Amino acid sequence: MDLLTVACVLGVSAAVALLLKLRARLQLSKAKHPSLRGHSRMARRVARLVPFYEYDETRLFGSDGAPAEIAGHRREGFLRLAALYGARFAETARLTAEAETSISDAQFTDTYRVPFQYTRFVRRHLKSGTFLAASRGVTVTDLDGNVFHDLTGSYGVNVFGYDFYKECMRAGAARVEDLGPVLGSYHPVVAANVRRLRQISGLDEVSFHMSGTEAVMQAVRLARYHTRRSHLVRFCGAYHGWWGDVQPGVGNPAPAHETYTLEEMDGDTLRVLRTRRDIACVLVNPLQALHPNANAPGDAALVDSSRSARFDRAAYTAWLRQLRDVCTERGIVLLFDEVFVGFRLAPGGAQEYFGVPADLVTYGKTLGGGLPVGVLCGRKQLMKRFRDDRPADICFARGTFNSHPAVMGAMHEFLERIEQPAIRALYANLDEVWDGRARQLNERLETEGLPVRVANLSSIWTVCYTRPSRYNWMLQYYLRAEGLALSWVGTGRLIFSLNYTGADFAAVAEKFVAAARTMQQDGFWWSDGTLTNQAIKRRILHEMVLVHLGRWTASRPAGHAPARSARPA
Ligand SMILES: Cc1ncc(COP(=O)(O)O)c(C=O)c1O
C-alpha cells in the first residue's frame, strides 16, 4: 500500500469515527427533556442569573394585575390569617424564631416555602413554626397544643401511622438492649432482617447504610465496578438523594461529569441505552410515575398554575418493561430506587406493584421502623465487593453506623409487624381506596367551583390548580389554619399514612375544602379571564430583566404605591 492509500484509509477512518461520535452526541441530545430540568449545566447557569427582588405590600397583593379593590380584599384576608397565626401558633413560632437562626436547614426550608418575591413578607406575618410536641394516630400536636391531621408523612417514612413506628422503636430498643452500642459485629436480628429482605426484594444479598442517599451511592458504585463503565442514567426530575452524581443540576455547585439526565418514558432514551457503551446503570424512582420528568413539586416554584400530574399505571408499567428489556440486552444494571415508595405501594414494593424485576433495589425511610436507614438489595454478582482473581481490585464501602443495633432492632419489629393480618389488610384494595378518596375530593372541589384538584399515586398526592394564578402557594397557609400539617414543600406533596380511616379522611376533605373556600373568598383566585400561565411567566421574566437593568421600581403598574422594598440582592 502506498503512502497516499494509507493516508486515505486513515482519513476515511477518522471521518467515520467522527461521524459516529457526532451521531451518538446527537442521539444523546435528542434523549434530553426539552426543559431546563433536562439540561443540568444550563439550568445551573440560568439559576445563577435569577436576581432577588421582592414585592412591597401593595404590589404583593396585586402582582397579577388585579384591580386595587381585589388587592385590598386579599390584603384584608391575609392580615386576618396573620392574626389567627399570631394567636394560635405563638409558642411554636417563638421557639422557631429563636432556634432557626442557628439551624441552617430550617432557614433553608422556611425561606423556600413560597416564591421568593413574596417570601420575606410572608415569613414576617405567617410564622409557621418547625417544632412539634407529639404525634398520635393520624395527627401531630404543636407546642401550643394545636392538633393537626398529618399530611407530611414524615418525608414518606410514615406508611402505617406514627403509633406503629413508636412501637417498632420501643420494642426494637428492648430487643437489642443487651448489646447496646456495639458496632462492627452484628446483633442476631441482622440475620433475620436479611432473610426477610431477600424474600421481599427477590434478590440475593443485602447491605445496610445510614440513609437512602448512601444506599444509592453504593448501588451506583457497585454498578460501575462490575460493568467497568462510567456513567449513570437518571431521569429528568427524579430525586435520588443529595449525592452529587445523582443531583447534577441546580442545588449542586459542582458539575456531575458522569451522569446522563435523560427524558423518562421516551423512545430516544431507549435508543441511547441501546447504543452507548459507557452506561453502567439506570436509576428509576417510581414516584416519578405521578409526574414523569417533573421535579418534586414544591410551592416555592408555584409561580403559576402549570403544575400538572397524572398517574397512568399501565403506561408506566409498559415503560418499565421496555427499560428492563433494554437493560438486560445491553448488560446495564437496572436500579429501582424505592427509598420513597417501597412498602407503600405493595408489600413487595414497586417491583411487585408494576410487576417488573430490578437488578438492584434501594430501600430506606419507613424500613428503619422510625430510625434512619438505607438498604441496598441486589443480585449476588452485582453486590460482591472484590474479585477472586484480582485481590487488589476492590469496591470499597463501609460506614461506622451501618447495621447499628438500634436500627436493626426497629427494622426487625417493622418487618415482623408488616406480616400481621391487620397490616396486610391495608394493602388489599389500596388503589381503590386512595383513588376513590381523591375522586371524592375532586368532585367536591368541582361542585364548589374551587380551582383546585388533587392527583395521586396511591397515598402520595399532589395538588394542581385549574385557573392561572400567582397565589396558589397561599393555599398551604389556609390549610394549616384549618388544621392540616404539610411539609415544607407545601401543597406539592401530601402524604397520607395508610391508617387513615374513612372518617379521618372525611375530616381532612372537610378542612381542605374549607381552606380553599376561604382562600377563594379572600380573592386570591380572582381572574378577569385574560391571565394565562404564559403571561405570568412573561411578567416574571420582565420583572427580572428590569431588576438586572436597575429599573425595577419604575415598572410599577399604574395606580400602585411605590415598591419600597425592591432591593436586588
Ligand atoms: C427516591 C429517593 N431516593 C433517595 C432518597 C434519599 O434518602 P435519604 O434522605 O434517606 O438520604 C430519597 C429521599 O427522599 C428518595 O425519595
Image (cartoon, rainbow, N blue to C red):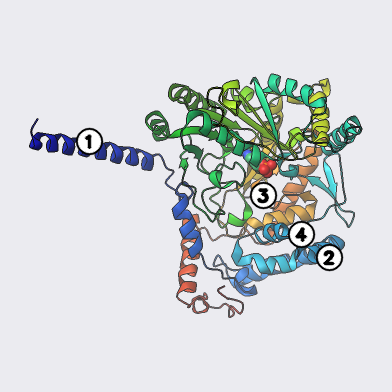
Q: Nearer the viewer, mark 3 or mark 2?
A: 2
Q: Amino acid at mark 4?
A: Ser
Residue that label 4 marks: 128
- Residue 519 position by quadrant: bottom right
The kind of secondary structure element at disc 3 is helix
Other residues around mark 1 within 10 Å, as few (<14) / some (14–19) / many (≥20): few
Q: Which residue position is annotated with label 1?
A: 16
Which residue is identified by label 3? 491
Number of the front mark, 4 or 1: 1
Distance in Å between CA atoms under marks 2 and 4: 10 Å
Mark seen at residue 293: none
Q: Is residue 201 left or right of residue 332?
A: right
The local secondary structure at tag 1 comes to helix
Q: Nearer the viewer, residue 493 or 466?
A: 493
If you read the primary sequence from the N terminus, does the residue marked by circle 4 or circle 1 appear first? 1
Quick one: label 3, few (<14), some, or many (20+) residues within 10 Å?
Answer: many
Q: CA distance from mark 3 to mark 2?
A: 24 Å
Q: Amino acid at mark 3?
A: Thr
Residue matched to label 2: 94
Cα distance in 3D space between marks 3 and 4: 14 Å
